[in-house]
Image (spheres, coloured by chain):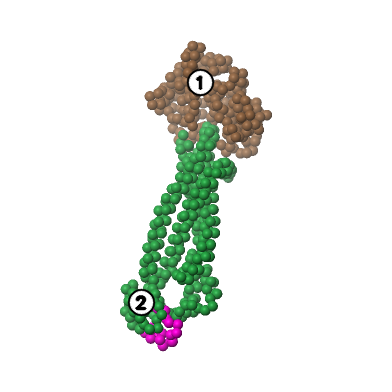
């Protein structure tokens, strides 16, 4: 589903990714872990083609996106659902409208929107909040809206960037259950995270990046020791996408 | 297709409404600049018409005959003129014919002449000459013949008018370029405000796979709405003001120059087309400029 073939990306003299090769299969659930600045964000931005690689090839859903033109980018992104740490909901739209927006953007018909939106709201467990505004919801509920929006167009891949970063542990686990459920329906899930306990508990495939290199790719635990975590993450900054 | 346009239009109307104040100011500014253009256009068209009408007579010297002349006097005058150098043809025009022709020239406003108590025009000879120097000498000589009331010809006026027309045309071109640039900047800045207000939404749209045209559409339409409203306001103002102006001084101009002003039934439809094209052009261009930078990210 997503293949990185010897991909390099540098920002001036800073390394973003260095000879990274990863093969994410259809239906996989993959955690992307690593210290801040390790290259996780670069990895995602390359998949979304917000930035372009210096060398190597990237395949998404069978297409070599490395020579995609500007016009092909919307089509690429329609195959990918994005979930953000800060939810990125539109404040002046209701829950229903926020999710419907994703369908309007790709010109879905009103009839389909009216049918599909309640369905995904039900799937993430907030069908009863359809007419509320984001400001009236808890953080966990807002993230559910974010997930509903990401999956409403049935994307092939769901990319979640620190989806539990702003949530308490209990709520975080609820979100993980939803993501797991979506994965079980056949959607490939790629989740960037720092949350060691979640990764350990979920027991999924873990791809670890450090200094732009893929340092580990195996089933199971978070991998970094507590000391490493403390060392790496003591001065952690929040990864931010720049529009 | 239509639903896409409908969606963009709904968004455009909503965001235009949200920034009422700024949009209103922009419309005022663009309307003002269209009015200035309109004034230049009106001046140009009228001077041009004036020049055209009288240039029909460029090779003609009008010799007006005294009111009390008898036929013998008139024939004597005709013979004298025919003998002059450079005269090609002499044609008699009675005061009745003169009035008829004047009526024709005045076109739509010809009815104004129906109310005259008596015909104020004199009988005349139209003396066709072969060039300007002949016109000068014939005019000078004819003036001295007894029984000739007055002589006039348009050669000099035409030359002056041609100059005026050229000047107005060039000046309007310069002013137009300047004003269009200013208007585009005004629209671009106005739209930029909306773009900033919605920048978060635009970012989300792009992650959701919106095409450039989907993002651009509402802003483009907002620009076009601005241009269109300005065009409508400018057209309406020109219609009212120009109508007033010709109803007040139009008659005087006709009486003094015996040339009609361009009727508003001809002028306004043309202005509407020009304003609408300008407004839409300015709106489109302005909004494309302001959204371009955002789309490239």
* Gap between marks 2 and 1 measured at Cα: 101 Å
Tell me the crowding category of disc 2: few under 14, some 14 to 19, or many 20 or more residues within 10 angstroms, Cα based.
Answer: many
Subunit ID for the residue under disc 1: A
Position of residue A157 measured from the top left corner of the image (x, y, whole percent): 54, 27
The question of residue B85 being in magenta is answered with no
Same-chain check, marks 2 and 1? no
The colour with which the image depicts chain B is green
Residue at 43 percent across and 85 percent down: it is B69
Residue A203, compared with residue B157, is above or below; it is above
Magenta stretch: give its range. Answer: B63-79
Position of residue B145 measured from the top left corner of the image (x, y, whole percent): 36, 82
- Image quarter of residue A15: top left
Residue at 50 percent across and 78 percent down: it is B119
Depth check, front residue: A54 or A5: A54
Q: Secondary structure at mark 2?
A: helix
Residue at 54 percent across and 50 percent down: it is B229
The colour with which the image depicts chain A is brown
Position of residue B124 measured from the top left corner of the image (x, y, whole percent): 43, 79
Residue B100, compared with residue A79, is above or below; it is below
Residue B150, compared with residue B109, is above or below; it is below
Depth check, front residue: B259 or B283: B259
Label 2 with label 1: CB-CB less than 8 Å = no
Q: Is residue A166 visible?
A: yes
Q: Secondary structure at mark 1?
A: strand
- Tell me the residue that label 1 is attached to: A32
Closer mark to the observer between disc 2 and disc 1: 2
Subunit ID for the residue under disc 2: B
Tell me the crowding category of disc 1: few under 14, some 14 to 19, or many 20 or more residues within 10 angstroms, Cα based.
Answer: many
- Tell me the residue that label 2 is attached to: B139
């Amino acid at each position: 589903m997503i293949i990185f073939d010897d991909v390099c990306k540098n920002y001036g003299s800073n390394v973003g990714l260095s000879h990274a090769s990863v093969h994410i299969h259809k239906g996989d659930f993959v955690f992307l872990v690593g210290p801040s600045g390790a290259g996780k964000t670069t990895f995602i931005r390359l998949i979304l083609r917000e930035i372009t690689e210096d060398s190597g090839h990237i395949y998404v859903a069978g297409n070599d996106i490395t020579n995609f033109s500007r016009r092909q980018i919307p089509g690429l992104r329609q195959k990918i659902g994005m979930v953000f740490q800060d939810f990125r909901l539109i404040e002046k739209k209701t829950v229903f409208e926020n999710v419907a927006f994703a369908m309007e953007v790709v010109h879905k018909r009103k009839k389909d929107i009216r049918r599909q939106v309640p369905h995904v709201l039900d799937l993430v467990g907030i069908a009863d909040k359809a007419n509320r505004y984001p400001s009236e919801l808890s953080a966990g509920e807002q993230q559910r809206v974010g997930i509903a929006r990401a999956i409403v167009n049935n994307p092939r891949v769901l990319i979640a960037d620190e989806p539990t970063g702003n949530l308490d542990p209990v709520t975080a686990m609820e979100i993980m259950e939803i993501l797991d459920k979506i994965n079980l329906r056949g959607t490939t899930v790629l989740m960037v995270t720092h949350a060691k306990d979640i990764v350990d508990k979920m027991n999924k495939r873990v791809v670890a990046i450090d200094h732009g290199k893929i340092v580990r790719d195996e089933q199971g635990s978070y991998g970094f020791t507590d000391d490493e975590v403390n060392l790496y993450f003591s001065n952690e900054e929040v990864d931010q996408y720049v529009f | 297709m239509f639903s896409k346009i409908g969606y963009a239009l709904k968004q455009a109307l909503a965001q235009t409404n949200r920034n009422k104040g700024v949009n209103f100011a922009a419309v005022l500014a663009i309307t003002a600049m269209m009015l200035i253009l309109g004034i230049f256009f009106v001046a140009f068209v009228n001077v041009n018409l004036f020049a055209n009408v009288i240039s029909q007579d460029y090779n003609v010297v009008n010799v007006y005959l005294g009111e009390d002349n008898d036929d013998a006097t008139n024939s004597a005058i005709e013979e004298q003129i025919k003998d002059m150098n450079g005269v090609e043809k002499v044609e008699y025009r009675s005061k009745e014919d003169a009035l008829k022709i004047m009526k024709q020239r005045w076109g739509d406003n010809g009815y104004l002449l129906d109310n005259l108590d008596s015909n104020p025009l004199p009988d005349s000879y139209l003396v066709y000459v072969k060039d300007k120097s002949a016109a000068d000498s014939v005019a000078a000589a004819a003036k001295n013949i007894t029984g000739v009331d007055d002589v006039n010809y348009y050669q000099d006026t035409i030359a002056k008018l041609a100059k005026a027309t050229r000047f107005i045309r060039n000046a309007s071109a310069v002013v137009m370029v300047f004003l269009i640039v200013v208007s585009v900047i005004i629209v671009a800045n106005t739209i930029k405000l909306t773009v900033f207000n919605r920048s978060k939404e635009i970012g989300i749209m792009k992650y959701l796979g919106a095409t450039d045209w989907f993002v651009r559409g509402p802003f483009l339409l907002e620009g076009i709405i601005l241009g269109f409203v300005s065009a409508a306001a400018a057209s309406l103002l020109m219609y009212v003001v120009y109508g007033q102006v010709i109803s007040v001084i139009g008659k005087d101009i006709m009486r003094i120059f015996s040339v009609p002003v361009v009727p508003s039934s001809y002028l306004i439809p043309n202005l509407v087309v020009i304003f609408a094209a300008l407004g839409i052009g300015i709106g489109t261009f302005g909004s494309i400029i302001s959204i371009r930078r955002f789309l490239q990210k």
